[in-house]
Image (cartoon, grey):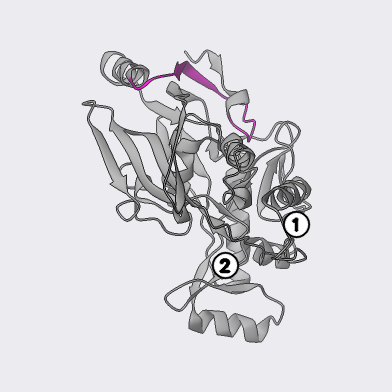
Amino acid sequence: MNSVAIKSLNTFRMNVFAKRIVVALTEEDLLKAWRQATILDNQPILILGGGSNVLFLENYMGTILLNRIRGITIKESKDAWYLYIHSGEIWNRLVNFSINQNMPGLENLAFIPGYVGTAPIQNIGAYGVEFCQFCEYVDILQLDNGKKYRLNKFECCFDYRESIFKHSYRNNYAIIAVNLRIDKIWKPIIHYNGLTHFNVNRVTPRQILNRIFLLRKRKIPNPLFQGNAGSFFKNPIVDAKTAKILKNKYKNIPIFSVKNNQFRLSAGWLIEKCQLKGYKMGNAEVYNKQALILVNNGKATGTELILLAKYIRDKVSEKFSIWLEPEVRFIASQGEIDPSKIL
């Protein structure tokens, strides 16, 4: 019988329950909890940080393991600072800490919710900067045998909102720590919308951080009042031919060159052009200030949010011949499930 409410542990504020919640302060705690759940109790187990990128579809029939292993170690060379950060540190606190310690560079990634352990999984990014630009390596723990591994940034296979941790190291592994390299020669990244008014020769890291706070506050609803996980869908990547066709048809479509003759579109723009901003389905809604965000207006079920997401995908596909992929992870009673099976 499920007995522990986990509404406060997921930013979608889904009113669901789990069998047990365990807080891990050490690697030993992680291993102990994993053994208890999987071997002794024969139950699934889910490692969770801030719950900012998951959608619980129903009650979870296992253990929620909260990774709270903390600690930051700083080393430096002539050219850079090296920060070794344990995965249970809150990401935004790390960003503020680095700025306060006069180690600028992470400011564009400020106010991204969640914990450090989530950052490499999603290769988090915002305002023209991605986690992989700083990552030197990631330390992981194999939970079924206690072995530790170190993957360098190339072995992590980082890509847009992608990494190897979504695939090969998806099960039976926990991210223990990351090592970041921050160059001592600071170069402000201000080419993204909302930052372009800054003077590159005068702007400070704190000014960029404060501006991003205001931008995110305007675009993303407070999950305490409207449950959400930020961007629900990834921005789609298309080839040059598709980008050209779309540009010819929609003169003001936002298109960004990425690499290998590929281009990134704005999923929010595509959804908005389908007249779906503010669209409601039961207690689930497309946020009226940013179409990329789906919100729980208090009592939404996982089914309602899935139906809304499916409706959006179908409409965007119908209008643009592009299939949106969810950025959010879907969690069912026994664990994470492939979105393609239900969308």
Q: Quadrant of residue 47?
A: top left
Amino acid type, mark 2: Ser
Q: Nearer the viewer, residue 224 or 88?
A: 88
Classify residue 203 as left or right of residue 321.
right
Residue 6, position in %: x, y? 57, 22
Residue 308, position in %: x, y? 63, 49
Do we see residue 59 in this rendering?
Answer: yes
Q: Nearer the viewer, residue 80 or 20?
A: 80
Of mark 1 and mark 2, the one earlier in the sequence is: 1
Residue 11, position in %: x, y? 62, 34
Q: Residue furthest bottom?
A: 248
Give the residue at x 47% y 48%. 122
Residue depth check, mark 1 versus mark 2: number of the one nearer the observer: 1
Residue position marked by numbered label 2 in the rendering: 317
Give the residue at x 70% y 56%. 291
Amino acid type, mark 1: Lys
Count neighbours of disc 1 (C-alpha within 10 A) and say few if under 14, some if 14 to 19, many if 20 or more. Answer: many
Tell me the distance, in whole angstroms, between the alpha carbons under discs 1 and 2. 16 Å
Query: Does 62 appear above or below 294?
Result: above
Residue position marked by numbered label 1 in the rendering: 277
Query: Does 279 appear above or below 43?
Result: below
The stretch of residues the image draws in magenta is 10-27
Do we see residue 168 in this rendering?
Answer: no
Query: Does 241 appear above or below 148?
Result: below
Residue 177, position in %: x, y? 39, 35
Q: Is residue 81 magenta?
A: no
Q: Is residue 11 magenta?
A: yes
